[in-house]
Image (spheres, rainbow, N blue to C red):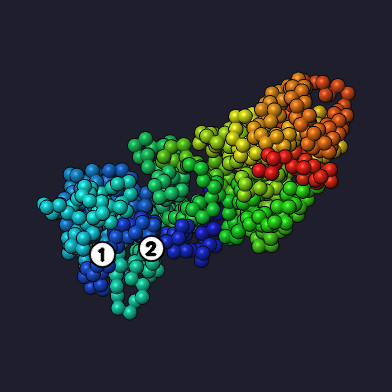
Amino acid sequence: MSWIQKLYETYEQCASQRDSPDSGAFLEPICHTSQQAHIEVSLDDNGRFLRANVIPKGQGATLVPCTEASAGRAGSKPVNHPLCDKLQYLAGDFLKYGGVVTSGFAGEPKEPHKFYLSLLSEWANSSFTHPKIIAIQTYVQNGNMIGDLVREKILPIDEDRQLLAEWTGDKKAMPSIFSIMPNGNPPDSAVVRWRVEIPGEPLPETWKDQGLIDAWISFYTSKKDNKGLCLVTGDNLSLAEQHPSKLRHGADKAKFISSNDTSGFTFRGRFIDADQACGVGLDVTQKAHNALRWLIARQAYRNGDQAVVAWSVYGKKIPDPLANSFDLFGLEVEQPEIQQEQVSQGDSGQAFGVRLTRLLAGYRAELGSTNEVLVMGLDSATPGRLAISYYRELDHTEFLNRIEVWHRDYAWHQNYSKDIKFVGAPAPKDIAEAAFGRRLDEKLRKATVERLLPCVIDGQKIPYDLVESTVRRTSNRVGLKHWEWEKYLGIACALFRGYHKERGYQMALELNRTSRDYLYGRLLAIAENIEDRALYVGGEKRDTSAAKLLQRFADHPFSTWKAIELSLSPYKTRLRARRPAFLAAMENQLDDVVNLFQADDFMEDRKLSGEFLLGYHCQRQALRTRPETEQDKNVEPTAAETN
């Protein structure tokens, strides 16, 4: 149960960071939930109706009091919230205007309103009452809500004075309530929130009134009498009967802890009742779940039902373990001098290492010496059951060290797009895409991210099948769009370099590395450069032979190199007339690389490993930054080059 204890501690430490319900991430108080409201009703302090209005889209997030049953309500007879809810609960004249109640209440259609009014009246008549609750109770007892909303032209009716379920008239005249209802639901399912305007009180909104929030918490907890041992704190507390849901989003019904199987009794033979199997205090479980909900909304990686979140118990900022180096550095990598460092032939990662160390030093200073970092992965196999697929508790120093190792070992020159070029490690989601394609199945993406989490957090070696799959897909250049191939090339090089970190691959061209695969990659880059320059001189735009034959070259380098070298003859002839100095330099480089092969390595036709991509990428980078010679400058440009 350590996870729930850490989340409980997180809530206690971060309660002061609570934002307003209107914000995207809100740390909710206990016994409350967030609800999307559609109609706002304003009353005076005596419970008289003042006005009503439709809440515009995006402004209806409302903190509402709830019970354990109503927070996780589901089924045909959902339990009402005590204050803000749908019209079928609040309006005494709901049936008079033809409102349709939930199917489970069809036999007793007045039940929803009766239950709502009963709980509201119990609260209003208790010692934990509040002036705004008394005003709302007075108004609800009158039973005129639908009539008031019809008179205010919030809810449209037909000639029989029955509520309209859909609008069939002119769209320009359509009441605004139809445009804000989710999924085309009828207006009679709208959720109402309250404003009570009391003279001298500047805050009429009930969902922002801290006094009213505290009043409901005190009232509800005073009714709890099932005391027992809380397995989290070890104290004798009021135990939770139901545990919260809605962790990943508002419609999420999956729970960590559930014991509602009273027919099959999943705990039969071990315990007499469910509380003996798992007793957690109401205050503890609600604070823990609210903290997790807040963290997920605020900083989690999301992929369908999968969520991965890392946080500090004290609410300190920490680096995202699933971010690539560009996102980790933020705007720093966009500075011109850093861009210049990235394309420099001599930059083998030192500049990146310095920036990484400097960044993480800032995190270490902010976290101090007493902070724990936790990483939790969540997923659900069924709609109702939530599982912890990954969980780690780490000292902040250990966490930052592992983040540094990941970004340092798997760093390479990355080319994500025209505007995003950086030196660093790719994100796990990008690795999954490079290994299996952009259209990979959601389950496969989730499984791949789960496999990579221990590599980032625990320092484990990356699975070799992911390295091989990425190299194989990158070698199939003709099957990818140009921008895809450029992105996957950087990722493939990063994975191969990180997997074989003992070989000490540099991010710049290594002129003294004589391994067969690395040299073949260099040859391919030089051949591509020769043909590419010849095509440019001739005004042609098409793929080079090296690009077309990349897959075949990876499988049969020696025999494919013969074909590539023969295809260069006409391009060499063109360059000999137009770019003699350039051609001479390239031919010298070809000779130098061939002379570096050991013994019979050059004539072996066995398949190349991913190392050839490193040699190719580094050689290509070096050729792109080759300074122009005086002889090149003195050659007159062709018509194609000047156009």
Which residue is tagged 2? 217
According to the picture, the residue beneath numbered tag 1 turns out to be 52
Most foreground residue, 119 or 213? 213
Crowd band around label 1 with a 10 angstrom C-alpha radius: few (<14), some (14–19), many (20+): many
Callout 2: SS: helix
Q: What's the residue type where badge 1 is placed?
A: Ala
Q: Residue sitting at 17 percent across and 60 percent down?
A: 147
Q: Is residue 143 visible?
A: no
Q: Residues within 10 Å of mark 2 (few under 14, many from 20)?
A: some
Q: In this orientation, which residue lies closer to the viewer: 588 or 361?
A: 588
Q: Is residue 316 visible?
A: yes
- Asked whether, in this view, residue 87 is left or right of residue 395, the answer is left
Foreground disc of the pair 2, 1 = 1
Judge whether 386 appears above or below 366 on screen: above
From mark 2 to mark 1, how far is it between C-alphas? 28 Å
Q: Residue at 32% across / 46% down in the picture?
A: 183
Q: Where is residue 207? Give x, y as percent.
A: 36, 64
